[in-house]
Image: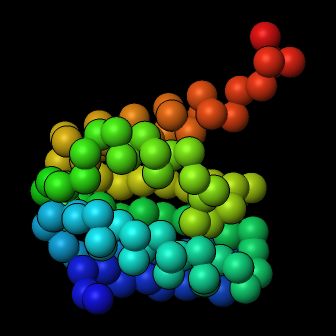
Amino acid sequence: MTGYQIDFCAAHDCIRLTVTAEIITLELAEDIYLRLKEISSKGGPYATIYDLTCVKDTTIPVEMVKGYARRNPSVPMGRPHVIVAEATTIYGLARLFQMCRFIGTIQPSDY
């Protein structure tokens, strides 16, 4: 499947995902998730840059974005993860994803 490129910088242990598709579909998102999960399972921890500057929109429903936030991350946390997006819709969904992930990590003992 095309629509994205993944680069790895061994000197900085950093993965960079560049999405080249203008529209992110559920199929594309799932393909990216599985590929990043495969790559990150071979070492780490990795810093990650998600370059979404070419993306203009998505066909993924908001509830599905929330569901993705509840999944195990494709690249485990431990190092910085940076999302770069220009389209307001994509930036907003990325923030929603981030907030849902954060809320999902709060434990009753944190109160």
Q: How many marks?
A: 0
- Quarter holding the C terminus is top right
Q: Residue 93 in the image: x percent, y percent? A: 32, 41
Q: Which residue sits at x=60%, y=58%?
A: 73
The reply to whether residue 7 is visible in this rendering is yes
Quarter of the figure with residue 40: bottom right
Q: Residue furthest right?
A: 109
Q: Which residue sits at x=36%, y=47%?
A: 64
Q: Is residue 110 left or right of residue 40?
A: right
Q: Residue 8 in the image: x percent, y percent? A: 55, 84
Q: Residue 107 in the image: x percent, y percent? A: 77, 25
- Quarter holding the N terminus is bottom left
Nearer the observer, 80 or 42: 42
Quarter of the figure with residue 27: bottom left
Q: Is residue 13 left or right of residue 7?
A: right
| Above or below, comparing residue 109 to residue 69 in the picture | above
| Above or below, comparing residue 40 to residue 79 in the picture | below
Q: Which residue sits at x=57%, y=66%?
A: 74
| Above or below, comparing residue 42 to residue 22 in the picture | below
Q: Residue 79 in the image: x percent, y percent? A: 70, 58
The reply to whether residue 47 is visible in this rendering is no
Nearer the observer, 52 or 98: 98
Q: Which residue sits at x=79%, y=18%?
A: 108
Quarter of the figure with residue 26: bottom left
Q: Is residue 15 left or right of residue 64?
A: right
